[in-house]
Every structure is written in structure tokens, then in C-alpha cells.
Amino acid sequence: MSMVSRKAGPFNFTVSWFFSGLLLFATPAAAEPPLRYLFESVPANTQEDGSAKGARPFVCSVPVAPLVDMSKLFGFYKPSQTQSEVDPAAMKAYVKRLWPTGAVTKKMLEMMEAALDMPGQGRNAANCIIRQMRVWASADALLGSVEDNDPLGHRQAVLVGGWTSISFSNAYAVAEEVSPPASSADVPIKAWFAKLSDMIVAEFTPAPRERKYAWLDGNSNHRYWAAAAVGLMAVHLQDRKRFNWSMDILKSALDEVPEDGGLPRELARGGRALKYQNFAMDAIAILVRLADANDIALDADQEKKLQSAAGFAATMYLHPEQLETRTGYRQEVEPGMVTWIDVLLPHFKHRDPELAEKLDAIAKPLRPMTNTFIALPSTRLIGDEDTK
């Protein structure tokens, strides 16, 4: 099998110059506005120095040790056409193998909530976030021996890197607002983000594959999550090339949404079709909100398809029997499936109030909702003041 190396970073930067007439001097391109994160609101009490009277002190625990070795990863589904039946033994081994990523994601969310919600403790929690991030960044966590995998394991290693980087990226956004880190901490963290981004983009850049692995290509939740991770890190890096890569995937994803909104690659997952439709919506929601925050407009057809995909996911969540009839498989319903609603709600309130009302009714009894893959402080999203 012909292989293309995925080790090299995919971005090669050049400086272009515009020469006018005989002036023969370089004219820099017009400065683009800085990239903005998808949430930015921080309560005033997080800006206080010291502890508010009666507030419990924030204690920064020992950092979670970094996971560096990403070699020989494996899946946890039993062999089948739909890849929908979990092998319990394989799942147990998978969770044990990647335990540090789950532990650090949980810790990041706890620190984000402390920075935002504990009066007078914002700076301490923000410093704790940076401390944890430096430990992982300094070790080049999530990057070791990625090439020592078959194509399936390679994809799994890259996705784990992407999902975990989303948690770090969101926590870093909170820390930056509450207590901006010193450059000595900032530089290694951003260098790590750049390496993670390069790994992700390389994985989702077309390369020859054996036929049995061809399913790894094309649009699916894998690609959407890759774009979400790279887009979030691109904001921290203020890197338009990486950011535009993520936006291109968002638009191509929406271009391919069928009229009814059901995502074909996700609905092919048998008994996990409902889970994966919503899982894909999680990533799409992040990308849409990033687009909104940076004035990237969807065209009318893309907007219509986004509404269709969201409407389909919501309808099937409320009426899984309809999807069971369509797929021939029983579908399990879990409240955590619809975390994407609170991420996308501000977008729809301005574009489809009727759909927004329907989605809000689903989410209201479930709030606060937390998805460890998104790990967003949902009450701090831009424009969601009236969703609390």
C-alpha cells in the first residue's frame, strides 16, 4: 500500500507582496480582525483579587499526568456492518488505556466552573488551568508514537487528541479572560496547540488508503470533530489558515446534509444512529458558533440544511420510534445527547425562532447540561443570556 507520511505539518506559510507600478515596495495586506472564541462572557466576581468573605477557597490539585504514548490504539465495537455493538471487554480496556484524557477533561471542566462561579477565586482557578496545561504541553502529550498504529488506530489516536484538545482549548479561553497567563506559559502551550492542529489536519488530508479503510474518508462526525478542534485552537493561535480549514469543513458538511436532515454516515450506525446523529451535531454546533463569533456567514441553503439536521436530531430524540422504524434497530435515548441545543440556540433565535422555541422546550428540563467532549460552561456562551 502506498503511504503518505502524516508526520509533517500541513501548513507552509509564505508572504505575498503586491507591487504597484514602479513603486517597488512591499504593501502589506489589510489587517484582518482578530479571531474570536465562541464564548467570552465572564462574571465580574471572577476578576476580584483574593477571596470574597465566606467563599470557600479554591484548591489546585496535583496535575493529571500527561498521556504521551498514543501507539497501538484499538476500537471497542464488535465486528459488524454497522459498528454499533460495543464489546464490553474492549471498552473496558479502551477506557483504561486512555484514562488520563478522561480525567484531565473532567478536571478542566471543574476548573472552568470554579474560575467562573467561585467568588474571588477566578485567578487561582485560572492559574491552576495554566499549570495543568503546561504539564501536558511540555510533555508533547497526545503526540507520541501516533504513527505506530494501523489506519484505524491512527484515526482513534488523532480523534482522542482532538477531543482532549477541545477541553484544553475551552479551559484556556476561560483562563485568558480571567487571568491572562505570562508569555513564559503562553508560548509552550500555543506551540503544543500548533502541533496538535498539524496532526489533525494531516489525518484529514486525502491520502491513499487500502480499500477496507476507505470509510475513514468523507464527511462524518470524525471530520466535524477534527474541524472543531482545529478551529478552536486556531483562535488561540490567531491562525487564519487553520481557522479557514475548519470553516471549509463546516460548509462542506452542511452542503451534504439531505433534505430531511438525517446524516447518512451517522444513521448507518444501526442501534447507535440516534447517538451519532446527535454526536455529529455537537461538533457542528461548535463550528457554527465559531463562525457566528467571527462573522462567517452560511449561505441560505447551508442555513436551511443546518435547520434540517437540528430539527431531525430533535425530532428523533423526542420520537425514537420513528428512527427505529427507519433503521430497524432499537435506539437508546440519553439526555446528554442534546447538549448541542444550548450551543446552537442563540444562532437559531435570530434565524428560525420557531425551531429555537422547539429546541428550548427540549433543553429546559435538562439544564444544566454537560458533555465531556464539548466541556463548555454552557451558561457563559456568547448571546445565551436569555437561555438560562
Image (cartoon, helix red, strand yellow):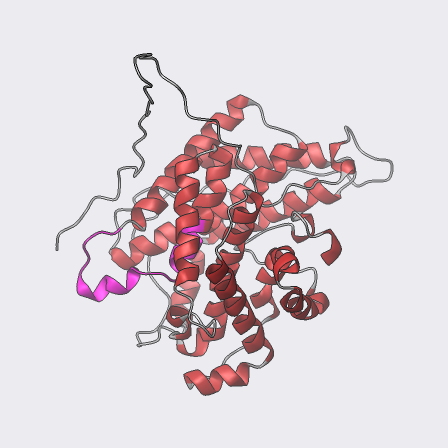
The residue positioned 13% from the left and 52% from the top of the image is 2
Q: Nearer the viewer, residue 208 or 66?
A: 208
Q: How many marks?
A: 0
Image quarter of the C terminus: bottom right
Q: Residue at x 51, y 69 (%)?
A: 308
| Picture quadrant of residue 77 | bottom left
Q: Quadrant of the N terminus?
A: bottom left
Residue furthest left in the image: 1
| Image x and y of residue 368, in percent | 69, 59
- Residue 293, given in percent of the width and then of the height, sits at 57, 44
Residue lying furthest front: 21
Which residue does the image show at 60% across and 78% down from the upper left?
318
Residue 31 sits above or below residue 140 on the image: above
Residue 12: quarter of image? top left
Residue 148 horizontal/vertical position (percent)? 25, 48
Residue 222 included in the magenta stretch of the image: yes
Depth check: give the residue in front, 233 or 125.
233
Q: Nearer the viewer, residue 183 or 114?
A: 183
Residue 306 visible within the image: yes
* Rendered view: 267 above or below 48: below
What residue is at 47 percent from the left and 33 percent from the top?
237
Q: Is residue 345 above or below residue 333?
A: above
In the rendered image, the vertical position of residue 218 relative to residue 78, given as above or below: above
Give yes or no for residue 375 being in the magenta stretch: no
Q: Which x, y percent locates residue 259?
A: 45, 72
Asked whether the viewer can see residue 278, the reply is: no
* 313 relative position to 149: left or right: right
Left or right of 214 on screen, residue 55: right
Span highlighted in magenta in the image: 206-227
